[in-house]
Amino acid sequence: MADPPWLRLGRRGSIAFIAIGCVALVFWQLQAIEQADGLDRTYRRTVGRGLYEQRIQKYFYFQYYTGKFPITTTRPIGKMQWNADEAWRAIGNPEGRDLPPRTTNRRGVVRKSPRLIMEDYAVLQTGDLGKIFLLYPDAWVNGTPKRATLRSFNRGLGIASLLALFVSFALLNYRLLGTTLVILLGSHPQQLLELYWRANIFGYPIALASLMLALHAGLIFARPKSRAVYLLPVVSGVFLVSFREVRLEPALAILSVAGTYLFAAGGWRRRSLLIGLLVVCAATTSALWSRYWDAQFHEAYRIVERQGGETFDGDWNAHHAFWHSIWCGLGDFGKSKGYLMDDRTAYRWGIPRVNLRFGTDYRLRDRAYVLHNYHTAARKHHVKPETLELYSVVMRDKVLGDIRQDPLWYAGVLLKRLGRVFSNPTPVRLGIGAHHADVPFSAWLFLPAIGWLAFLRRWDPLKLLAFYLPTSLSAVAVWSGGSMTYNSAFHLVLFALVVCWIAHASSTAISGYTARRRPHPGARGASEQ
């Protein structure tokens, strides 16, 4: 996998290669950003956007100006006054800031503070509240939090992940492999759409896996002896678990990191320490986030209550509901047992069984994602089924019961999902802006490739091939429909390796041919004599 002879550069050559490559990479990705409206939309995600965009923007109003969350307002976003003074005045100025007098409207009437609420439809009940922080870059770029989106963060993450991967591989003298992989990942049609065009949260798995690979390439290809290597699990654990507050799929890169530590060189003592540090940092970060959200929630509750607003007194989810997602996900190949990828179908199946089993009285609403029931007697907020522990119990028992009764059925579901992952990934693509060309290549070659590498005991390429596998894990473990298989990137790693192998084979063949054509030093003298 190392560079062929013609690409082995000296110190100055390496610096020039990295500098020119970084500039070219940024310019190349900016072309895709500028031409985002013309990108191929064949491989866009067909289900969901992952956040209530307009609702989260109003939460961000108070987060940005006051640091208080979750607080929002019933006032339409177009009629809000976007400045810090009005935001602090709306929440009662709990810190005693020196605020100017209230402003007036065009008619000279003093503007009133908006009515505060904590829950807007089902933002809190859906979970994954860390998305609020991803709006900051857009607010900084535009100079205002008004209508901030994920666009600036997504663009920065996409470019940063490619730059990190390119520089990391170049410093380790894997320039051909790194450059090829960066070109393929930077042309990935699903990545370009989700990060640069739609600006939602579904383009993060590959980008985060690329960042982690850039950090850990030294452990895969080299044998670092510096104690600084023990900073890797600290940084990785904190970063990935923090991203768990946004969405689970990107955080699955922690499995790749743990696998790298498990098979790293240096003996079991070193491996155990790396894995131990990763686990401790991940667990600590998760606990700190839980405490942070609880503290924020209680402070927001006090502020909204003091201002006469609408507090939220029900249950809310820190993250996406697990068993509800598993139940719906079985709608890809488990329809014979009643599963369907539709939230409302899951409610219609689960809620009556909750009532029958536990004696409750939850009532469904037609075409709605919440129930007729309310969290409290004040009837302020409808119950979202995913927040009910009894509902999760019923969904869990259904899934596990079907698996226990018919394990071959579930094995068949997993095999069919695997087949879809290999048969329906994104193509190997080379793209510039809105223009692209696809290269014929089958992801099924991955299976014989790992078998052959294992037979030859080539562990480094095997570890590299396995690094992006968690990007396909949701399609195998949860749901393989709705373009979920487009998150995969393992086949691009294999293609990059094939390019390197062909380059090395060509260099070896050319060198051998040149050596055969070159006359032996003593041959000419002997013929002259």
Image: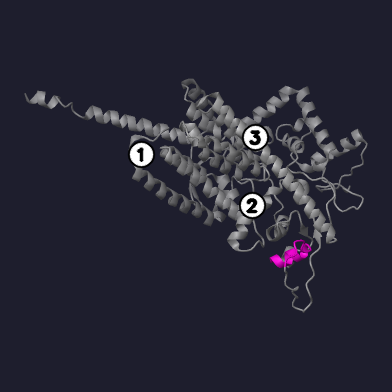
Q: Residue at x 79, y 75 (%)?
A: 110
Q: Residue at x 73, y 31 (%)?
A: 334
What percent of the width, then of the height, locates residue 55?
73, 56
For the residues labelled 3 and 2, the Cα–Cα distance comes to: 26 Å
Q: Which residues are magenta?
A: 83-97
Residue marked by disc 3: 280
> Which callout, 1 or 3, points at the residue further toward the start of the chain?
1
Relative placement, left or right, of 482 versus 229 is: right
Q: CA distance from mark 1 to mark 2?
A: 39 Å
Q: Amino acid at mark 2?
A: Leu
Which residue does the numbered mark 1 point to in the structure image? 7
Instruction: For the C terminus, give its image quadrant.
Output: top left
Horizontal and vertical percent for residue 107? 77, 79
The answer to which image quadrant residue 351 occupies is top right
Q: Position of residue 6 (x, y in %)?
A: 33, 38
Say which element carries label 2: helix
Where does residue 165 sit, x and y in percent of width and height? 49, 42
Mark sitting on residue 134: 2
Left or right: 119, with 159 as reference point: right
